[in-house]
Image (cartoon, rainbow, N blue to C red):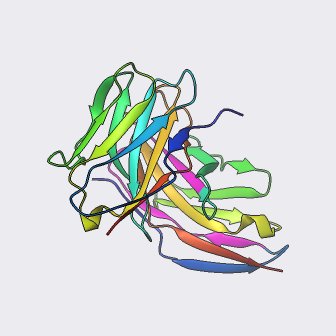
Amino acid sequence: AQTVTQSQPEMSVQEAETVTLSCTYDTSESDYYLFWYKQPPSRQMILVIRQEAYKQQNATENRFSVNFQKAAKSFSLKISDSQLGDAAMYFCAYRTYNTDKLIFGTGTRLQVFP
Amino acid sequence: EAEVAQSPRYKITEKSQAVAFWCDPISGHATLYWYRQILGQGPELLVQFQDESVVDDSQLPKDRFSAERLKGVDSTLKIQPAELGDSAMYLCASSRDRSGNTIYFGEGSWLTVV
């Protein structure tokens, strides 16, 4: 069975600085997707960034980028130039090609200080 | 921008009572998901629909939970009877189809069982 592990329950960063959130996963499959979702307090979960496992190039979306290490089964999220609005719970998630089922980690609460 | 609509946002119910949650996915989205998110944990899939058919309900406690999507559009998740351990946020999500498209989440329905 696939599992997703986020070992950092909480992280903090100062505004304008860079922070990296860690995620590891376990799977025996070779084709899959990985995601980072952001869940602000009392707001809906929104997609931050996605990575297809067959792509070697790391995904980037504006200030958000990932470091995808397929062999190590590691998928970290880097937030550059952190903003107050980045404060939220961040969930790493895994999805197979076959089932479309999202498997989430336990989340990392990110605090951003001015 | 189209969103996944859920109601009610908050529900307090007594143990052993019945409770229902409603979800209206983004128009044209064939795949609909219900997730349960216990405080401090990541969401866990309860049931997945493709149009009006159940694709995966392996984690749905079928003795007390039921879900339907009769016309392949909106969906209802019911709990009867509610138990204290059912207190959680119930998230609805949808995607265009099962081919790896982005999954969009609603704001969730918070349930407190007293």
Q: Is residue B94 left or right of residue B68?
A: right
Q: Judge whether A86 appears above or below A102 on screen.
A: below
Q: Is residue B100 magenta?
A: no
Residue at image position (37%, 25%) is B50
* Residue B113 image position (x, y, % from top left): 33, 65
The residue stretch that appears in magenta = A18-37
Comparing B17 with A66, the one in front is: B17
Q: Is residue A56 left or right of residue B14?
A: right
Looking at the rendered image, the quarter that the C terminus of chain B falls into is: bottom left
Q: Is residue A86 left or right of residue B44?
A: right
Comparing A100 with A57, the one in front is: A100
**Residue A80's quadrant in the figure?**
bottom right
* Residue B31 image position (x, y, % from top left): 44, 29
* Residue A29 image position (x, y, % from top left): 35, 44
Comparing B72 with A89, the one in front is: B72
Residue at image position (68%, 80%) is A12
